[in-house]
Image (tube, rainbow, N blue to C red):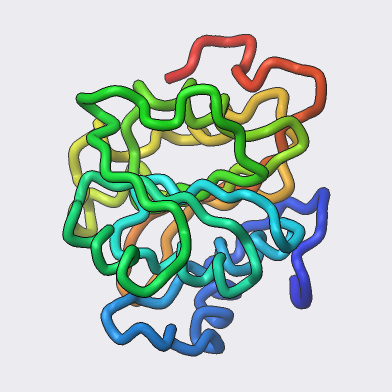
Amino acid sequence: MSGPASENVSTFSPRRDAAIADTIQPMTHTHTPTPSPWITRFSALIPAGRQVLDLACGQGRHARYLQAQGLQVTGVDRDGTALQSLQSDTAGEWLQADIENGAWPLEGRLFDAVVVTNYLWRPLWPRILASVAPGGLLLYETFAQGNEAYGKPSRPDFLLQPGELLQVCAGWSVIAYEAGLLRSPERVVQRIAARRPHGASPLPATPLP
């Protein structure tokens, strides 16, 4: 599929997205890696000026990209050094927090989109889903079962089970979902773009993984 992202599509084409990656120019911040083509593609569905949460944002490869698209970004990470870099040259909201062992720093807050990449801590599923406002987007991409054949992460705790993102987003409107092997570097991933329905609980009826 080419052109802007659209609703109600479901795709599986790692080669296509690898080709998209080749067309994306590096960010001007010399220490920030290029953002994921999955995030750049589906963030086009977020209207300018909306509030976006970049969870486990690291050095801000997605936070910086999203800000450049006119979005208001809140980033959370436990790495204070990485956040200092963001604080020094961006206008977003950057929160240092150990979200696995400490208090959730965003209690009661809702975002028009939540972005998570290369991060998995299953006890946070309810928090993540509840942070997406009704009608908002979840853009999630991380390593999946099978990645252990190519490198780290290799522990099951850090690898999505087959179809796990679809299970987590049960009851949401799935815009796109992919699972499979990507190249350069080789890794096995799952990724989803899903919209939270209006007037319904963000959590699926079945227990989360």
**Across the whole image, how many numbered discs are drawn on residues?**
0
Q: Quadrant of residue 33?
A: bottom left
88 up-or-down from 53: above or below: below
Give the position of the C terminus as an image quadrant: top left
Q: Position of residue 84 (x, y in %)?
A: 24, 62
Report the side of 195 relative to 32 (left or right): right
What residue is rendered at 47% in x and 50% in y? 74
Q: Position of residue 52 (x, y in %)?
A: 57, 50
Report the side of 111 relative to 86 (left or right): right
Give the position of the N terminus as an image quadrant: bottom right
Is residue 143 something that shows in the picture? no
Q: Nearer the viewer, residue 128 or 194?
A: 128
What residue is rendered at 59% in x and 57% in y? 72
What residue is rendered at 36% in x and 74% in y? 89
Q: Nearer the viewer, residue 64 or 182?
A: 64
Q: Position of residue 203 (x, y in %)?
A: 60, 18
Report the side of 173 relative to 106 (left or right): right
Is residue 4 something that shows in the picture? yes
What residue is rendered at 19% in x and 53% in y? 80
147 up-or-down from 69: above or below: above
